[in-house]
């Protein structure tokens, strides 16, 4: 939690951006979520919007900001003797309110009467508990309080959502410090994983070492760890295989700091410690793409244009290997890059590993005049905006050989004569490669977050595995 002045300043800025709006902005903090039964809960994680505006990392709280008077009220319940017996004493709601500079406090049961008859502004939620409260207060169905996906939540306040997006897209110096911390720890976590790779080791053993470190140094992992010898499966969470000679191990994992800022790195390793010639050829292309994206990242450049430049480089290099034929620019225009990289180049990162996507992916990742493509790959680009100082984005190009997708395109006659489907058959057991760093946009360019960049050049990867 930052000092109280930080939260006062953020709420004051939010009020400035919402000047002229009537009513109240209502925020519901998260509560404990039962795993198997009421008293056996998942590990508590506070709502990120709540953390940004109020900082209080405790369950069962709500807040109201009056957009007309500018005053804020914290709602919650003081602990009773049963709470003290089981959980120990805790500060009163009035004390919590004062610690983050809120003018008023009140029992949680008084929240409905406090907002009755007022226009209610809220941001989309991802939890049923929060949706039920918001729906009751706003007089709508709880299901209308969820984000509908890329387009966001039609019932939510567009003014409030847009104000928070613009505030949170630009990271404050103290946020950057915590992101650097999370990234440094994330790099250490990845180094532990790399050092544990050995033929015959079960993937789960490596995951356990990684996640044990994350829990010892931070809140835990920032998302479900992806560690797999099937890199062509983007969200492969099975960790049952033994490390096999000649295969590639893709590790996509992040650490969340105790302050709830995320990291997100991906590296791909030769299980035997040395790349085969075919692996090195593809790996080197992905490495070049990662470097190109970083070198192009600066204020005033759209991340969509960087995605397209990376796609052009990738197709050009694949052409040199004889896997595609034609002009790379034209192939990019036709959407053929999606066969090899069906995901976008990167996403925003901050208090969430995919920062603010609960507001609606298009609202967060696309700016004025931009729209989402229907092409495979480009259509999955989560961050397309024109970059500005203080943005934090991931740089994660990849190349994947997905047999079912290749066969589908081949059978449908897509890019016939341009994509060499016969030669691609030699890559059906290849898997996939992704390389990801976390990047902060600076006035004159960008820098990678974290103290020590993980080895990424092919020769450095091999050296790190054979030291």
Image (tube, rainbow, N blue to C red):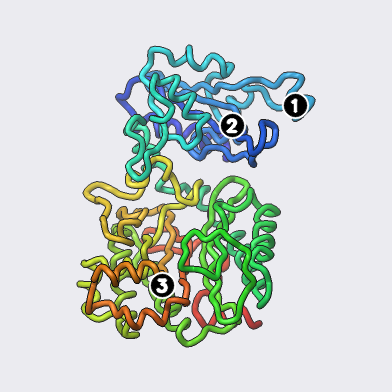
Q: Which quadrant would residue 193 be assigned to in this image?
A: bottom right
The answer to whether residue 392 is visible is: yes
For the residue pair 421 and 143, the one nearer the viewer reads as 421
Q: Which quadrant would residue 37 be assigned to in this image?
A: top right
Give the residue furthest to the right: 85
Q: Which quadrant would residue 283 be assigned to in this image?
A: bottom left
Query: Dot 3 lies on which element?
Result: loop
On screen, 396 above or below 199? above
* Residue for point 60% across, 53% down: 221
* Residue for point 37% across, 39% down: 148
Judging by the rendered image, the residue that carries numbered circle 2 is: 31
Question: How many C-alpha atoms fall within 10 Å of the one at disc 1: few (<14), some, or many (≥20)?
Answer: few
Judging by the rendered image, the residue that carries numbered circle 3 is: 401
Horizontal arrangement in the rendering, residue 224 relative to residue 25 (left or right): right
Question: How many C-alpha atoms fall within 10 Å of the one at disc 3: few (<14), some, or many (≥20)?
Answer: many
On screen, 413 above or below 385? below
Which of the two discs, 1 and 3, sits closer to the camera?
3
* Residue for point 32% across, 55% down: 384
Instruction: Please provide percent x and percent y for residue 146.
Output: 42, 34
Query: Dot 1 lies on which element?
Result: loop
For the residue pair 420 and 139, the one nearer the viewer reads as 420
């Amino acid at each position: 939690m930052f000092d109280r002045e930080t939260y006062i300043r953020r709420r004051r800025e939010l009020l400035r951006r919402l000047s002229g709006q009537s009513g109240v902005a209502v925020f519901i903090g998260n509560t404990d979520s039962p795993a198997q039964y009421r008293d056996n809960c998942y590990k508590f994680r506070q709502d990120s919007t709540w953390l940004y505006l109020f900082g209080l990392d405790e369950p069962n709280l709500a807040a109201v900001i009056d957009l007309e008077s500018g005053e804020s009220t914290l709602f919650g319940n003081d602990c009773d003797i049963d709470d003290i017996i089981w959980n120990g004493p805790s500060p009163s709601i009035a004390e919590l309110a004062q610690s983050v500079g809120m003018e008023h406090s009140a029992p949680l049961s008084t929240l409905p009467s406090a907002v009755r008859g007022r226009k209610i502004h809220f941001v989309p939620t991802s939890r049923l508990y929060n949706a039920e409260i918001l729906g009751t207060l706003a007089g709508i169905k709880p299901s209308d309080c969820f984000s509908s996906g890329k387009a966001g939540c039609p019932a939510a306040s567009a003014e409030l959502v847009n104000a928070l997006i613009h505030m949170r897209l630009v990271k404050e110096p103290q946020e950057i410090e915590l992101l650097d911390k999370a990234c440094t720890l994330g790099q250490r976590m990845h180094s532990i994983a790399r050092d544990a790779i050995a033929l015959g080791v079960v993937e789960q053993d490596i995951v356990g070492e990684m996640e044990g470190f994350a829990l010892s140094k931070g809140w835990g992992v920032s998302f479900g760890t992806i560690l797999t010898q099937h890199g062509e499966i983007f969200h492969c969470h099975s960790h049952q295989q033994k490390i096999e000679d000649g295969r590639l191990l893709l590790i996509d994992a992040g650490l969340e700091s105790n302050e709830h800022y995320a990291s997100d790195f991906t590296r791909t390793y030769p299980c035997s410690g040395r790349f085969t010639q075919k692996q090195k050829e593809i790996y080197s292309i992905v490495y070049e793409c990662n470097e190109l994206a970083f070198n192009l990242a600066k204020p005033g450049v759209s991340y969509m244009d960087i995605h397209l430049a990376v796609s052009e480089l990738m197709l050009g290099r694949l052409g040199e290997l004889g896997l595609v034929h034609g002009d790379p620019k034209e192939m990019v225009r036709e959407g053929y890059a999606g066969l090899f990289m069906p995901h976008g180049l990167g996403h925003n990162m901050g208090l969430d590993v995919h920062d603010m996507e609960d507001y609606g992916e298009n609202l967060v990742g696309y700016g004025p005049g931009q729209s989402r493509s229907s092409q495979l790959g480009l259509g999955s680009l989560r961050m397309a905006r024109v970059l500005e100082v203080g943005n934090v984005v991931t740089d994660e190009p990849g190349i994947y050989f997905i047999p079912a997708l290749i066969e589908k395109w081949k059978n449908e006659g897509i890019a016939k004569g341009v994509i060499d489907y016969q030669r691609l058959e030699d890559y059906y057991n290849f898997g996939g490669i992704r390389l990801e760093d976390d990047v902060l946009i600076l006035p004159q360019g960008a820098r990678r977050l974290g103290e020590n960049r993980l080895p990424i050049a092919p020769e450095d990867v091999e050296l790190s595995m054979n030291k």
